[in-house]
Image (cartoon, grey):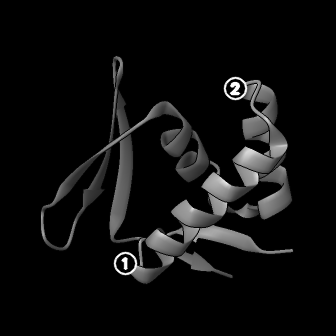
Amino acid sequence: MKIFKLSENVSVKQDGENYMLFDNLNGNIYKLNAVSYKILSLCDGENTDEDIIQNITNTFNAAKEETVKDFNDLMQNLLERRYVSNI
């Protein structure tokens, strides 16, 4: 079981149908899809990886195996960039 927390150096925002991640250190802005935005919004230091995967599977009516793969790929990328931490 892992618990992820969004870095204090980034923020995620929703503007209508658009979702964005802001890197507050260098000013970069990344466009997110709805699933990535939801995952990041759940990285609050309280939800476990299983909680997040279950939430995504239910919310988007997605196959659990695909959700697990996509979640792990996204988390690996975000951990490498230090946009999230595993606490």
Distance Cα–Cα, label 2 vs label 1: 26 Å
Q: In the picture provided, is 2 more to the left or to the right than 11?
A: right
Categorize mark 2 by other alpha carbons within 10 Å: few (<14), some (14-19), many (20+).
few
Left or right: 29 with respect to 78?
Answer: left
Left or right, residue 55 beside residue 25: right
Using the rendered image of the protein, determine whether residue 7 is visible from the camera's viewpoint: no
The local secondary structure at tag 2 comes to loop
Give the answer, above or below, for where 13 lies relative to 2: above
- Provide residue 31's location: percent of width, then percent of height: 28, 42
Q: Is residue 10 left or right of residue 52?
A: left
- Looking at the picture, does residue 85 appear above or below residue 16? below
Residue 28 in the image: above or below residue 65: below
Front-most of residues 86 and 45: 86
- Point 36% across, 55% down: residue: 11
Q: Position of residue 3 (x, y in %)?
A: 74, 71
> What residue is shown at x 68% (from left), y 57% (from top)?
69
Residue kind at label 2, given as amino acid type? Phe
Report which residue position mark 1 lands on.
81
In the rendered image, is residue 67 in sight? Answer: yes
Local crowd at mark 1 within 10 Å, few (<14), some, or many (≥20)? few
User: How many numbered marks are there?
Assistant: 2
Q: Considering only order in the chain, which callout, 1 or 2, is on the residue closer to the N terminus?
A: 2
**Who's the residue at 36% across and 18% down the image?**
17
Q: Which residue is mark 2?
A: 60
Residue 23 at x, y = what percent?
A: 25, 64
Which structural element holds mark 1? loop
What residue lies at 87% left-to-right and 74% top-to-bottom? 1
Quarter of the image where the C terminus is located: bottom right
